[in-house]
Image (tube, rainbow, N blue to C red):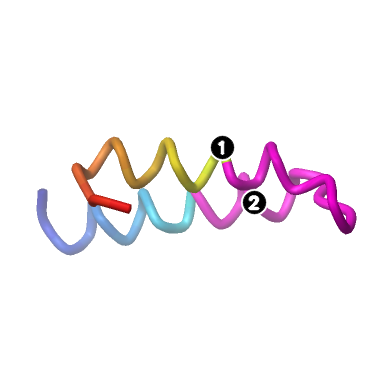
Amino acid sequence: MNQKQLTEKAIELLKQLISTPSFSSEEDKTADAIEGWFKSFDIPF
């Protein structure tokens, strides 16, 4: 994956996070989005 593709994927994640409601103590969907992004790039967490 080149720099441009990685940048586009990061922007997609940020857009998803911005559009996901995440009120205090209700961050499950946000955490799921970040977890999925990490898994898609084989980033251990």
Q: Which of the two discs, 1 and 2, labels the residue nearer the N terminus?
A: 2
Cα distance in 3D space between marks 1 and 2: 10 Å
Residue 10, position in %: x, y? 40, 57
The residue furthest right is: 23
Please give left or right for residue 9 compared with residue 23 in the image: left
Provide the residue designation for mark 1: 32
Residue at point 62%, 45% (across, down): 16
SS assignment at label 2: helix
Task: List the residue tagged with mark 2.
Answer: 17
Mark 1 neighbour density, 10 Å: few (under 14) some (14–19) many (20 or more): few
> Residue 30 location, x and y as percent?
65, 46
Tell me the quarter of the picture where residue 24 sits. bottom right
Task: Give the side of residue 7 with respect to residue 11, left or right.
Answer: left
Q: Check the image and report above or below for 18 versus 37.
A: below
Compared across the picture, whether 5 is left or right of 11 comes to left
Residue 13 falls left or right of residue 16: left
Task: Point out residue 25 in the picture as x, y percentages from the top left corner.
Answer: 85, 52
Amino acid type at circle 2 is: Leu
Residue nearer the viewer, 7 or 24: 24
